[in-house]
Image (cartoon, helix red, strand yellow):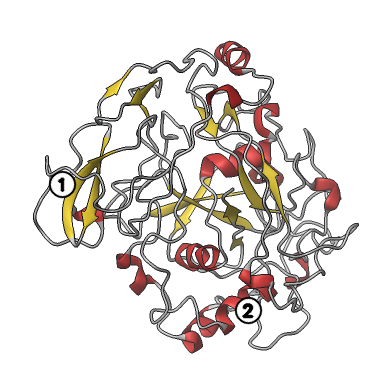
Amino acid sequence: MRSLAFLVSIALASGCSQKVRRFPNDSDSGSGGSGAGSSTTTGGSDPAGSSTSGSGGSSGACVDPAACPPAQGACMEAVCVNGACAERPRPEGTPCGEDGGEVCDASGACGGCDGMDCDTCGEPGCPNTCGSADVVEMPPSCADGRAGAGESCGSDVVESCCASALVPCGTYLRSYDGVSSTDDSFPAAVSDFRLDKYEITVGRFRAFVDAGQGVQGSPPPIGAGRHPHVLGSGWIAAWDMRLALDTAALKSALKCNRRDLWTWTDEPGSNEELPINCITWFDAFAFCAWDGGRLPTEAEWNYAAAGGDLHRPYPWGASIDADRAVYDCTGDRSAAGSCAFADILPVGSRPSGNGLWGHADMAGNLWEWTMDWWSEELPAPCIDCVHRVDGEHDAKRVTRGGSYSAPADDLRADHRDLSNALDRVTNIGARCARDL
C-alpha cells in the first residue's frame, strides 16, 4: 500500500528537523497572491519594496494582490507595493515544483535542492518548520479573566479557557484512518503550530464584542490572521462588509434561530463556558486574528484530530460513546432524538475524548470553521497548504468535527463538511490556531 511506503520514507527521529526552513515574516500587510495551498507556499517575504520586479506586474492601483495579474513563475509572487501591482521573488528555499521536491533559489528560479537533503522526508516533502520553541502568550480574550475567559474551563482539570497546546510538525495522510477511510492519495506536511485546547467560549467572544470588534467599523487589518507559510491567506478589505454593521447588529445576529439554541446572551450569565455558536466564517476569522491567532487550516485541523500519522478514526481512538463526545442530541444524557439547549455542553466536558495533544471537543459539541475554501477533492500537493479561490469571497468553507446534533460517523477525524461562509447556525463554532 502506498501509505506504508510513504510513512516509512518520512520517518525521522526528530520530526523532519534535518530539513528546517525558516522564513522572515511578511511586513507587507497587503501582499499575498492567491494563497492556494500549493508547493509554492512560503513563510513570508522580504519587506515591501525590498526585492521587487516589474516583470509581469501592472502599474494599476491595488490594495489586495488578488486583483493583480498572476505572478509569472512558481517562485515569484504578486504583491502590492506602494499601492501598485508588482512581483518579487519568493524567499530562497521555498518549496516548488509539482511535488514540492524542489526549492526556489535567490534569483526566483525553481530548481534542485541546493545542497539540502531532498530524500529525508519523502512525499510530499518536509514541513516548513520543525522543532520550534513553544512560547505561550495570554490572548486578549482571556486578559481580564472573566467567566468563560479565565481559569474556569475543562472538567477533570480546570484550567484557562485560552489554554493551547503545541502540535508538533509531521506528515500524514489526510482523511485516512486505515479502517473505514482508506484512500491514501492525499499526503500532507504540517509545520509546528499551537492549537487552542477549547472551542471559543461565549465568555471569550464577549471580550471581542465588548472591545467593539467584529463589526464593519473595526475590521481586522489587511493581512491579519494569515498563515505564516501561505501568502495571501490573511484578511482582505473585501471582507469588511461581510461583518455586522455595528455591535447591536452583531448581538442580534448571534441569536440565530427560532429554537432558542443559540449560546450568546447580551449580558454575562450561566452560558459563559459554552462554545459560541451562530458565528459566520468571517466572525471566526476576525475573532482569531484579534485574539493573536488565526483559523487552523483544514490540514492542520485534521492532523491534530487524527493524532498525526497515528490516523485515529476519532481523536481518542477507534470507538465512540457518549462518555467521550457530545453528539446525536445526547449531551444531556437523554436518548438520541430531538435536540434541546441542554445538549450543548461547556467546553471540555468530555475529557476522556481529548485528542493526542490534549485538545477537547474535536469530535462533537460544535462543528468548527477552518481556514479553507471547500473543494470536493483535497488540494495537492500540500505543504502547509490552504485552499482559497480568489474572487469567490462568499464561497463555501470547510467545517470539521461534527456537533451536538450530528450522528457518530460525522465525528470521525476523516469526515469533511461544508457551509456557506455567511451561515449563522447553532451547530457551528470555531477554535483558533497560533503560530510559534
- Residue 321 versus residue 285: which sits nearer the camera? 285
**Are the residues flagged by discs 2 and 1 in contact, CB closer than 8 Å?**
no
Q: Nearer the viewer, residue 407 or 218?
A: 218
Instruction: Give the x, y percent position of residue 44.
Output: 39, 45
Side (left or right) of 120 relative to 30: right
Residue 121 left/right relative to 94: right
Mark-to-mark CA distance, 2 and 1: 41 Å
Task: Name the residue tied to disc 1.
Answer: 69
User: Is label 1 in a helix, a strand or a loop?
Assistant: loop
Direction right: furthest residue? 156
Q: Earlier in the sequence, mark 2 or mark 1?
A: 1
Three-letter code for the amino acid on which mark 1 is drawn: Pro
Dividing the picture into quarters, in which one does residue 411 lie? top right
Q: Residue furthest front?
A: 50
Residue lying furthest left in this view?
59
Q: Secondary structure at mark 2?
A: helix
Of residues 45 and 155, the one drawn nearer to the viewer in this rendering = 45
The residue identified by callout 2 is: 206
Q: Which mark is residue 58?
A: none
The location of residue 226, given as percent across then percent down, is 44, 54
Q: Is residue 172 above or below residue 226?
A: above
The part of the image, by quadrant, that contains residue 314 is top right
Number of labels in the image equals: 2
Mark 2, Cα crowd under 10 Å, few <14 / some 14-19 / many 20+, is many
